[in-house]
């Protein structure tokens, strides 16, 4: 069984329904995991996606914030969710394919602007969320599993436009990178994207604040695809669809792809 998977922080699935449809039509991944859907599940435009062949969905949503969804051309069943750090947010959903592969779709808290949990509650929530993710994967080590999503951390020096300038900026601080690394190690997760593209600057997010995001190219790799250790030889063809950042009224994130042969 071979399938291509994409992950994309869409920044409102209803506002950008047309962009989702464009991606599904032009790139045709078998599975598309969306984050920051900003919609209750019953308001997600499922019929439009079903008309394009994506008749299966598992999702968690809430009005105006957060929200995660897995759209699939392949049959997929709901495999539950976790509310790490007890935030009451729709930030995780899991789906199980017919071959038993479990796909985890995450939207990790962004963490606010100040990298100090004493001064910024949101930063503390982000660290707590990652700590509980770590503990969960340590206690139930994943097998035949894929984890994707906006993890809101760019871990490597070449995952940001300037390592030195971003060391004190939320998403690339040493404490966040350490927490993400512990989470990855606890589950035995393999960084699929960097296994396929080991060298060079690589980004999936560019701020709306830049007058010309493409020319400035001050990006960060916040969106990730991981695989459990038993799938380390099953993936290939990773890529970031940078062009999507330049579509009309885009998300500030670009989709990340990988193909799996299982």
Image: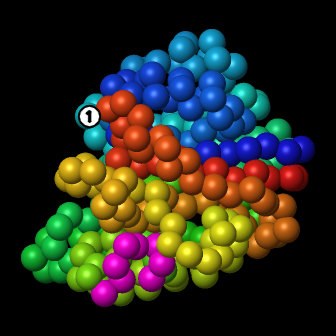
SS type, badge 1: loop
Query: What range is drawn magenta here?
Result: 157-164
Toward the viewer: 261 or 247?
247
Residue 50: image x %, image y %?
62, 17
**Residue found at x 68% / y 32%:** 28
Residue 49 seen in the figure: yes
Q: Which residue is mark 1?
A: 64
In the image, 2: left or right of 177?
A: right
Q: In the rendered view, would you say 7 is above or below 143?
A: above
**Residue found at x 69% / y 53%:** 258
Toward the left, the furthest residue is: 119
Toward the viewer: 245 or 12?
245
Q: In the rendered view, would you say 129 is above or below 246?
A: below
Question: Total number of numbered labels?
Answer: 1
Residue 184: image x %, image y %?
58, 76
Residue 153: image x %, image y %?
40, 69
Residue 219, by quadrant, is bottom left
Residue 192 lies in the magenta stretch: no
| Main SS of residues in magenta | helix
Q: In the rendered view, would you say 96 is above or below 237?
A: above
In the image, 58: left or right of 72?
A: left
**Residue found at x 40% / y 66%:** 220
């Amino acid at each position: 069984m071979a399938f291509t998977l994409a992950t994309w922080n869409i920044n409102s699935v209803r506002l950008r329904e047309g962009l989702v449809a464009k991606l599904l039509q032009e790139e045709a991944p078998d599975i598309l995991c969306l984050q920051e859907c900003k919609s209750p599940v019953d308001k997600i435009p499922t019929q439009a996606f079903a008309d394009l062949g994506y008749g299966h969905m598992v999702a968690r949503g809430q009005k105006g914030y957060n929200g995660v969804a897995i759209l699939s051309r392949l049959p997929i069943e709901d495999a539950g969710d976790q509310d790490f750090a007890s935030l009451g947010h729709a930030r995780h959903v899991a789906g199980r394919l017919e071959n038993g592969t479990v796909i985890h779709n995450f939207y990790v808290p962004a963490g606010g602007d100040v990298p100090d949990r004493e001064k910024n509650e949101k930063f503390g929530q982000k660290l707590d969320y990652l700590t509980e993710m770590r503990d969960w994967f340590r206690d139930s080590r994943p097998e035949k599993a894929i984890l994707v999503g906006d993890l809101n951390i760019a871990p490597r020096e070449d995952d940001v436009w300037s390592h030195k300038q971003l060391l004190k900026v939320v998403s690339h601080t040493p404490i966040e990178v350490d927490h993400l690394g512990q989470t990855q190690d606890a589950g035995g997760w393999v960084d699929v994207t960097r296994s396929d593209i080991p060298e060079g600057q690589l980004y999936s997010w560019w701020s709306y604040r830049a007058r010309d995001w493409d020319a400035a190219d001050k990006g960060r790799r916040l969106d990730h695809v991981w695989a459990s250790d038993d799938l380390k030889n099953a993936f290939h063809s990773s890529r970031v669809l940078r062009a999507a950042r330049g579509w009309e009224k885009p998300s500030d994130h670009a989709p990340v792809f990988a193909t799996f042969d299982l």
